Structure formats: structure tokens, C-alpha cells
Image (cartoon, grey):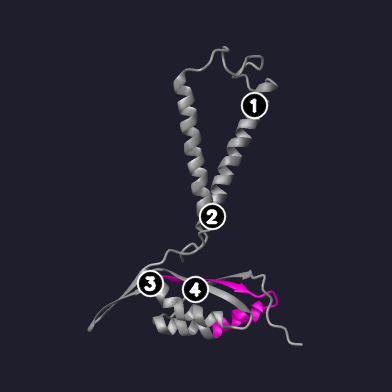
Amino acid sequence: MTDLNRPARLNRTLLVLTGLVLIAGGGFAVGTHFGRIPLLDPATTLVPGTATPPGWVWYAVAGGAVILGLLALRWLIAQPVRKPKSHTWRFEQDTGRTALAASTAVEPFTAEVATYPGVHAAHATLGGTQDAPVLAVVLSAEQDGDLAAIRERITEEGLPRLRQALDLDDLPMTIEFRFSAKAGPRIR
């Protein structure tokens, strides 16, 4: 199955690596300070001399800072991406070839789910390939919406219709519920 939360794995890996580097650096500094690591003398200065570094050092530091900033920006941009990669599905038949965009295939499903009681808005992404499809659904539910009833209705009504329309035996699905600030209609 396609990994639906690719940035989470990258986040965990980078956080673990950063943590290990910081722990190792801190351990080295403390060990050197107390004389446990004899590689450096604790009484020496951090850098030799008091002269200003050569001009190229400032350019190297600025370049490194820009690269680090761009990497951090790329990391931030990757955070909201939670949808699986979508493909165009191709159907070969005796009468010809049909290309179907995955976003077009889920539009009726999304429109139907958005009309369910308790659902404020619905978004769906059909990802993966035709051999290994995956459906990622993001629902904005009303504050008093019954999430179990919504999920049950999707799995018993909406998903079977989508599988039938796409001629699929199995379609794994994930649902992410978000709550809207808008409350549902009240009966008085």
C-alpha cells in the first residue's frame, strides 16, 4: 500500500539524526571539559588566535546558512502533503483505450459523501496504481456529527459504489476526520 504520510517518516528520521548529533556533540563537549576525553586540552581556546578569519570563510558560512534555510523551508513545505500520489488510469478494451484521471473518478463519491448527515465537506484522493489503489478521504465533520455513523455509511454505501464503478475487488481506504467550527442544524 502507498504510504499516506510520507513526511512523518522523514520527520522522525531527521529528528532522530539531529538528536543523535546533538547528544554526541554535547557528550563530547562535557567529556572534554572534565578531562574524560584527552583528545583536546580543556584549557585551550576554541579557535586559535584573535585575528579575523579570511574573507572566504564568511561566504562559506553565508552559503551554508542559505542551504540550511532552503532545506528547512523544503521540510516545512512537505508537512501538509498527506495525499497519496495520484495517477491516470488507462483501460484497454477491444473498442479502444480510455484514460481516466483519478481525481475525476472520485468526484461523484466525494459529492455523495458531502451530502451525508454530519458532514460539512469532503475531499478524496485516489492514489496508487490500478493494481494497488488506495483511497484517502478527508472529511470535515460538524461538531455534533456522529463519526461512527458517517464511517459506517461510507463503508456500506459509498465505497462499494466506487469500487463497482472502478471495477475493483478491493479498495483500501483511510479516513481523516476534521471538525468544522460550524455546528449542525438544531431541532427545537
Instruction: List the residue tagged with mark 2.
Output: 79
Residue at 50% across, 38% down: 68
Q: Where residue 36 sits: x, y (%)?
A: 67, 22
x and y percent of residue 122 in the render? 54, 74
- Give the secondary structure at mark 4: loop
Which label's residue is closer to the chain start, 2 or 4?
2
Residues at discs 2 and 4 in contact (Cβ within 8 Å): no
Q: CA distance from mark 3 to mark 1?
A: 54 Å
Q: Which mark is residue 126?
A: none
Q: Which mark is residue 131?
A: 3
| Residue 147 painted magenta | yes
Between marks 2 and 3, how big is the CA–CA gap? Answer: 28 Å
Callout 3–callout 4 Cβ contact below 8 Å: no
The reply, left or right, for residue 64 in relation to residue 150 is: left
**Residue 62 falls within the magenta-colored stretch:** no
For label 1, the SS is helix
In the rendered image, which residue does mark 4 sit on? 172
Question: Residue 29, which numbered label?
Answer: 1
Cα gap from disc 1 to disc 4, whole angstroms: 50 Å
Of residue 159 and residue 99, the one placed in the foreground of this image is 99
- 10 Å crowding of disc 4: few (<14), some (14-19), many (20+): few
Q: Quadrant of residue 51?
A: top right
In contact (CB < 8 Å): disc 1 and disc 4:
no
User: What residue type is disc 4 on?
Assistant: Pro
Circle 1 crowding by C-alpha within 10 Å: few under 14, some 14–19, many from 20: some
Please state which amino acid type lies under the numbered disc 1.
Ala
Q: Which comes before the other along the chain, label 3 or label 4?
A: 3
Up/down of 55 relative to 81, above or below: above
